[in-house]
């Protein structure tokens, strides 16, 4: 597509191939259209999906086009608005998550489920309807997004620690809410990373009993501090036996292939395991692990825009943010290596003023 829309230059960090490091570059952003909001990005979280995409690990489902600018946990200040923007003005705090557009007309959109719209446009590596090529994410000095996909950040929250709410937050908040996690329910959170640590905070805030399943025994004290009532080391069969058959709901936040059947055995009759983690390789499910116990297995994609705003407001009321390690953009490649070693407490956030 050759575009006639006026653009301006923004700074960014981009990967140019599946094996190259991310490096400083410049990109084009569209000059705001009538319903667009232009945001100066102050902080951007580092999600494991950024790594999967930058390294083209999801090639069969969503091949990566290069250069790739990841980043979908974006917070910043509004610097310009189009003539028809009603909800935002210059100087406001604003945030953008994983979605920047949808068709707005399909049954999912009509139902407020734009995150299941077949024409949804992800914040990066999705066809850019305005400029051609693919959308470019939040590892950048600015972003221009239609007002329907711009969120409000409660002023009371620390801005850097609020950035991960835009993906890790909503991706765990939504399935916990959708599947009725409240007081009296027993919930397992698998994988204490960016998503998992938010899952623990939300499940606890909703009043549930929470058990963390981890492969990292050294995370035990952190898990308890974050709100877990108990911690199970999932590689230890004796430890796994302690809670077997007792969970109403398990949220699987793991980024790599692992033993799903051992987790299904933790559910009680009619219990549900929901995947939000998206490992590169498929995983085996034994039908026996489901049949004996009428158990259910499902998946969940981020959350809707309305639900994301609800989650941000909930976080404002309850003082919930992510535990973050704020780093300069120049250290993003090092951060990727540490994420792969599960060595992050519990989300890296890029300080975009260092770009
Ligand atoms: P992360 O911070 O890297 O956390 C992943 C955690 O999984 C690790 O901290 C580790 O926890 C555990 N883990 C890693 N390798 C493992 C292995 N081989 N076996 C067992 N456990 C392992 O990643 P994240 O940013 O939270 O993202 C997690 C996954 O969710 C990614 O696949 C990401 O793409 C996906 N995601 C999905 C959605 C969605 O809408 N569904 C949205 C965002 C992200 P322990 O050390 O505690 O074992
Ligand atoms: Zn994400």
Image (spheres, rainbow, N blue to C red):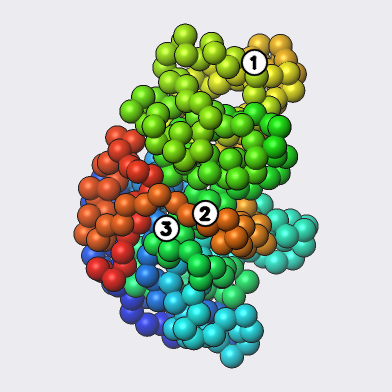
Q: Is mark 1 within 8 Å of ligand 1?
A: no
Measure the alpha-carbon separation of dots 1 and 2: 31 Å
- Please tell me which residue is depicted at 31% across the width and 64% down the height of the picture: 351
- Taking depth in this image into account, of 40 and 13 the one nearest to the observer is 40
Q: Residue furthest top?
A: 238
Left/right placement of residue 265 relative to residue 46 reads: right
- Lower position in the chain sequence, tag 3 or tag 1: 3
Left/right placement of residue 333 relative to residue 67 reads: left
The nearer-to-camera label among 3 and 2 is: 2
Which SS class for mark 3? helix
Residue 68 appears in the picture as rendered: no
Q: Which residue is mark 3?
A: 161
The nearer-to-camera label among 1 and 2 is: 2
Q: Which residue is mark 1?
A: 245
Number of callouts: 3
| C-beta proximity under 8 Å, tags 3 and 2 | no
Which SS class for mark 1? loop
Point out the image quarter for the C terminus: bottom left
- Lower position in the chain sequence, tag 1 or tag 2: 1
Badge 1 crowding class, 10 Å Cα cut-off, few under 14, some 14 to 19, many 20 or more, is: some
- Please tell me which residue is depicted at 25% across the width and 61% down the height of the picture: 328
| C-beta proximity under 8 Å, tags 1 and 2 | no
Q: Which residue is mark 2?
A: 320
- Lower position in the chain sequence, tag 3 or tag 2: 3
Badge 3 crowding class, 10 Å Cα cut-off, few under 14, some 14 to 19, many 20 or more, is: many
């Amino acid at each position: 597509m050759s575009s006639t829309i006026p653009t301006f230059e923004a700074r960014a960090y981009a990967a140019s191939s599946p094996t190259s490091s991310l490096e400083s570059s410049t990109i084009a952003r569209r000059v705001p259209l009538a319903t667009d909001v232009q945001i100066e990005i102050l902080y951007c979280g580092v999600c494991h999906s950024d790594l999967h995409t930058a390294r083209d690990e999801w090639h069969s489902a969503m091949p990566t086009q290069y250069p790739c600018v990841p980043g979908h946990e974006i917070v910043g200040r509004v610097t310009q608005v189009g003539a028809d923007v009603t909800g935002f003005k210059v100087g406001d705090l604003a945030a953008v998550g994983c979605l920047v557009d949808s068709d707005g007309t399909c049954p999912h959109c009509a139902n407020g489920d734009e995150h299941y719209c077949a024409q949804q446009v992800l914040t990066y590596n999705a066809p850019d309807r305005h400029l051609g090529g693919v959308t470019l994410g939040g590892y950048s000095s600015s972003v221009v997004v239609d007002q329907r996909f711009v969120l409000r950040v409660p002023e009371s929250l620390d801005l850097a620690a609020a950035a991960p709410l835009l993906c890790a937050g909503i991706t765990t908040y939504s399935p916990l809410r959708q599947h009725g996690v409240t007081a009296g329910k027993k919930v397992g959170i698998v994988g204490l990373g960016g998503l998992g640590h938010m899952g623990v905070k939300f499940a606890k805030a909703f009043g549930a009993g929470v058990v963390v399943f981890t492969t990292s025994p050294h995370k035990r004290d952190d898990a308890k501090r974050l709100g877990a009532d108990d911690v199970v080391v999932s590689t230890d069969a004796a430890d796994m036996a302690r809670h077997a058959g007792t969970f109403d709901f398990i949220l699987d936040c793991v980024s790599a292939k692992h033993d799903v059947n051992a987790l299904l055995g933790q559910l009680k009759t009619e219990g549900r395991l929901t995947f939000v983690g998206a490992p590169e390789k498929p995983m085996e499910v034994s039908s026996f692990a489901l049949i004996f116990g009428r158990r259910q297995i499902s998946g969940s994609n981020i959350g809707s825009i309305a639900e994301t705003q609800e989650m941000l407001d909930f976080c404002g009321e309850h003082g919930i943010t992510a535990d973050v390690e704020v780093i300069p953009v120049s250290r993003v490649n090092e951060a990727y290596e540490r994420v792969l070693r599960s060595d992050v407490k519990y989300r890296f956030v890029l300080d975009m003023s260092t770009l």
